[in-house]
Image: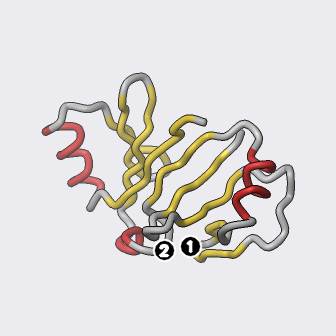
Amino acid sequence: MKIDHITYFGGTREEAKKFYGNILGLETKLVDGKVWVKIGDEYIIHLTIDEEAKTGGKCHFGIYVQNIGELAQRVQKNTELFDIIDGREIVLVKIDLKLKQFFVRDLAGNSIEFISY
């Protein structure tokens, strides 16, 4: 496993670029209207400007996993898995071993995305 990305609320695009680019001196880029921040060799921080990002699973960190199907089956025994489709949380009842991503909440309510590509 390794960190794939971190997504959280970054204010407006201008605020995000000003703080992370101008003040912190980090490299930023726009991808599909979203601000990404480069940490080390990779663009790993994704700043959303959606006010709803503060709730509903949009603020999360993503973890890359090689065998996501096996992990999903193991995790589902203890908690609910979900995906976010059109901004809504959809509970995953049946796990497809070809699954490319799923979300869970830890015991404190934080969202975590597991992703494979």
- How far across and how far down the image is residue 92, in percent? 75, 70
Q: Nearer the viewer, residue 109 or 53?
A: 109
Looking at the rendered image, the quarter that the N terminus falls into is: top right
Tell me the CA gap for discs 1 and 2: 8 Å
Q: Residue furthest front?
A: 78
* Front one among 31 and 26: 26
The kind of residue tagged 1 is: Gly
Circle number at residue 53 = none
Q: Is residue 11 left or right of residue 59?
A: left
Secondary structure of the residue carrying tag 1 is loop
Q: Quadrant of the C terminus?
A: top right
Comparing 98 with 80, the one in front is 80
- Give the side of residue 89 with respect to residue 94, left or right: left
Q: Quadrant of residue 65?
A: top right
Disc 1 + disc 2, Cβ < 8 Å: yes
Q: Which residue is mark 2?
A: 56
Residue most toward the left?
A: 23
- Res. 108 image quadrant: bottom left
Residue shown at the point (53%, 48%) measured from the top left: 62
Number of numbered tags placed on the structure image:
2
Which residue appears at 30% of the width and 54% of the height? 13
Residue at 45% across, 64% down: 110
34 to 67, vertically: above or below = below
Nearer to me, 6 or 52: 6
| Dot 2 amino acid type | Gly
Residue at horizontal 49%, vertical 68%? Answer: 107
Quick one: which residue is furthest to the top in this view?
41
Report which residue position mark 1 lands on.
87
Percent of width and height locating residue 63: 57, 44
Disc 2 on helix, strand or loop?
A: loop
Q: Residue 36 in the image: x percent, y percent?
A: 40, 43
